[in-house]
Amino acid sequence: MSLDYYNIESMLTTEEKLVKDSTKEFLDKEVKPLIVDAFQEEKPLNLRKIAPKMGSLGLIGGPVPEEYGGPGLSYIEFGLICRELERVDSSIRSFVGVQSGLCMYPIWQFGSDEQKKTWLPQIAKGKKIACFGLTEPNRGSDVAGLETVAKKEGDEWVINGNKQWISEGSVADIAIVFARTDKEGIKGFLVEKGTEGFTQSFIDKKVSMRSGDVGALMFDDCRVPEDNVLQGITGQGTRQIFMCFNQARYTISWGALGAAEDCYETALKYAKDRVQFGSSIASYQLVQEKLVKMLMEITKGQLLSYHLGRMMDDKKERHQQISLAKKNNVSVARYCARVARDILGANGVTLDYSPIRHMCNIEAVYTYQGTDDIHTLILGSDITGISAFTMR
């Protein structure tokens, strides 16, 4: 039974409960048995096999409407899916979050009718895999400073530059790539796998997200036609990019809770079973204090994400509220993973138990889609009216 101390499930609709339960059933059967070996060997999950199954269940695409091939989920339903995904592993939630919020969302919002018809149904069904090419070796949260450039030549655009730390980067069939232009700000391009001048590679030797694909994208005079431009990305382009970020950050706020809950449940069971000095360690005050603190932080995070999801369904959220949820809940997951590992003692560093794996994964989640410091600055600017992003 999943942790639900304030009985949030009583506020869910029958359909929302069904989405949550069916997602858990699928993951327990099809994905969870594969995770430890994938993490230990750093051999990412076979998404070509798993993604179509996920697509058939409507797990990919979130709020993208059915008319464009998406599942048309509410934000609460999508959040519940992401929580179950990351309860298993951050990499599988990251895959769904990227496909839905960073790839399908910009095509849906900023793409042409032809781009929507071509790509959205295929990605939603797991038949095609996409990636979001923004982060660079020297640029992360500083979106305005992108070094990848695109130059217009006739009816084509020539792209040069590098992208790094790209989820599904080495396997993607289509990359949504952002590049700086001379006169039109930052533009988004759809670059298909196999395009001349476009190279994809796998980043290995990681201690985080080892069950998922993380890659690099390289562009050397890569030519794409005008038809592959996301025409809805206008002006400086940053506003539309941050709209995509908001979608992904929302999935993280729920996903981090799944990791935290799994760590708590693992630690609680272990504490009840582990006997030292003639009693289970759960009977000792110091251990109970740790469990209670985990319970408190998780419960607060659950209430936060639940209310945020309702606000997003009502289109009443602000991006700063999404930042607060991402910042808070990832910090909660980071804390719970560390404390659970502590409660497990020496067993806490083995892959026989999940906390150490969650602990490693959460270090990446803590950093991507805006570091903890970046979200602090977003919130600080909102409450003081003073931006501290640059030195004066």
Image: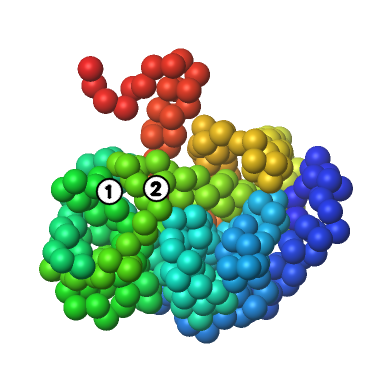
Residue 234 is at least partly visible in this image: yes
Q: Nearer the viewer, residue 187 or 168?
A: 187
The three-letter amino acid code for the residue at tag 1 is Ile
The three-letter amino acid code for the residue at tag 2 is Ile
Q: Nearer the viewer, residue 76 or 226?
A: 226
The kind of secondary structure element at disc 1 is strand
Query: Which residue is denoted by mark 2 in the rendering?
Result: 241
Query: Which residue is denoted by mark 1 in the rendering?
Result: 186
Position of 5 relative to 99 (above/below): above
Residue 181 coordinates in the image, percent (x, y): 20, 51
User: Measuring 32% from the left and 75% from the top, which residue is drawn there?
Assistant: 192
Residue at the far front in the pictured view: 154
The kind of secondary structure element at disc 2 is helix
Do callouts 1 and 2 mark residues in contact (Cβ within 8 Å)? yes
Describe residue 385's horizontal placement relative to residue 169 as left or right.
Answer: right
Residue 382 coordinates in the image, percent (x, y): 48, 23
User: Measuring 25% from the left and 59% from the top, which residue is drawn there?
Assistant: 163
Location of residue 194 (image quadrant):
bottom left
User: Measuring 31% from the left and 77% from the top, which residue is drawn there?
Assistant: 193
Location of residue 131 (image quadrant):
bottom left
Alpha-carbon neighbours of circle 1 within 10 Å: few (<14), some, or many (≥20)? Answer: many
Give the colouring mode of the picture.
Answer: rainbow
Q: Earlier in the sequence, mark 1 or mark 2?
A: 1
Residue at the far bottom in the pictured view: 49
Quarter that holds the C terminus: top left
